[in-house]
Image (spheres, rainbow, N blue to C red):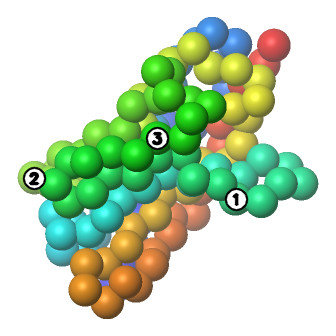
Amino acid sequence: QVQLVESGGGLVQAGGSLRLSCSASGIIFSMNLMGWYRQAPGKQRELVATISSGGITNVKDSVKGRFTISRDNAKNMVYLQMNSLKPEDTAVYFCRSVRSGTGSVYWGQGTQVTVSS
């Protein structure tokens, strides 16, 4: 059974930092594409950043230079370091995994990030 569990969300003032973590189980983690998405109230879910099995990253333009995605294959973990947070970063952040080969997609339950001005 695949399980993705996010943690690290919370309330932070503008300019602050948070580090999101996603723990994965039930998958061959090292072979999967991992990513972070977010969904603000009344908006569609959007890509924030992805990291391939080989460590190649793709980051949304609006967060480049502020957010960093990383992974630890030994621990089955993926992280999103968020610095210089802005009120517009407020959203529920979701961890996503795409299984190599089949393309099956798995989602975590999400973690709330709220940035106050």
Type of amino acid at the residue the image marks with label 1: Arg
Q: Which residue shows up at 31% across the image and 64% down it? A: 33
Whether residue 89 can be seen here: yes
Q: In this view, which residue lies farthest toward the left? A: 74
**Labels 1 and 3: the sequence-earlier one:** 1
SS assignment at label 2: loop
* Most foreground residue, 45 or 56: 56
Alpha carbon distance from label 1 to label 3:
15 Å
Q: Is residue 86 above or below residue 80?
A: above
Mark 2 or mark 3, which is nearer to you?
3
> Above or below — where is 86 with respect to 112?
above
At mark 1, the secondary structure is: loop
Amino acid under disc 2: Ala
Label 2, residues with CA under 10 Å away: few <14, some 14-19, many ≥20: few
Residue 45: assigned label:
1
Q: In which quadrant is the N terminus drawn?
A: bottom left
According to the picture, the residue beneath numbered tag 3 turns out to be 59
Q: Where is 93 relative to 115, above or below?
A: below
Q: Could you tell whether 44 is left or right of 106 in the image?
A: right
Residue 89 position within the rendered picture, expressed as x and y whole percent measured from the top left:
69, 32
Q: Position of residue 98 (x, y in %)?
A: 37, 73
The three-letter code of the residue at mark 3 reads: Val
Percent across and percent down for residue 103 are 37, 83
> Which residue is pictured at 57% across the width and 14% down the height?
84
Q: Tell me how far mark 2 sits from mark 1, CA to CA.
A: 29 Å
CB within 8 Å, label 2 to label 3: no
Image depth: mark 2 or mark 1 in front: 1
Q: Nearer the viewer, mark 1 or mark 3?
A: 3
Where residue 74 is drawn, which disc sits there? 2
Q: Earlier in the sequence, mark 2 or mark 1?
A: 1
Left or right: where 52 falls relative to 59: left
